[in-house]
Image (cartoon, rainbow, N blue to C red):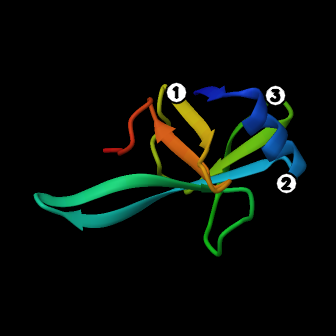
């Protein structure tokens, strides 16, 4: 898996402990279920496994989540960490 992160995101992650947690979140949409990735630097109350360790930080994902070719990490306007699967806003 290749990580795509900018310098601001890398600094943010390092400043918040050096770990990123990624998990899928499903919701109903007009044609059925849609899945997106959620990301945080604080560990949510669920099981995670290490999937990437490089560039000064670690990425943990829920077990069974198929790794994308690329995982894009960005900071939203309000400082929320966003994750994109192969550059897309949804997964599946």
In three-dimensional space, the C-alpha distance between marks 1 and 3, rounded to whole angstroms, equals: 15 Å
Q: Can you see residue 39?
A: yes
User: Which disc is residue 70 wearing?
Assistant: 1
Viewer-side label of 1, 2: 2
What residue do we see at 63% from left, 28% from top?
3
Label 2: element kind: loop
Quadrant assignment, res 63: bottom right
The answer to whether any part of residue 63 appears in the image is no
Judged from this view, the residue extending furthest toward the left is: 31
At a point 55% along the width and 33% down the height, the residue shown is 71
Q: For mark 2, what is the residue?
A: 16
Which badge, 3 or 2, is on the more N-terminal residue?
Answer: 2
Spot the residue most to the bottom.
Answer: 45
Looking at the rendered image, the quarter that the N terminus falls into is: top right
- Mark 1 Cα shell of 10 Å, populated few (<14), some (14-19), many (≥20): some
Identify which residue, 53 or 83, lies in the foreground: 83
Residue 58, position in %: x, y? Answer: 77, 42
Circle 1/circle 3 CB separation < 8 Å: no
The residue at 84%/38% (across/down) is: 11
Q: Which mark is residue 55?
A: 3
Position above or below: 76 against 31: above
């Amino acid at each position: 898996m290749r990580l795509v992160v900018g310098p601001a995101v890398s600094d943010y992650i390092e400043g918040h402990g050096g770990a990123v947690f990624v998990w899928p979140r499903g919701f109903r949409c007009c044609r059925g279920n849609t899945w997106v990735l959620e990301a945080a630097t604080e560990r949510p109350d669920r099981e995670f496994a290490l999937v990437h360790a490089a560039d000064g930080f670690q990425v943990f994902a829920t077990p069974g989540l198929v790794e994308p070719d690329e995982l894009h990490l960005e900071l939203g306007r309000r400082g929320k960490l966003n994750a994109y699967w192969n550059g897309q806003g949804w997964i599946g």
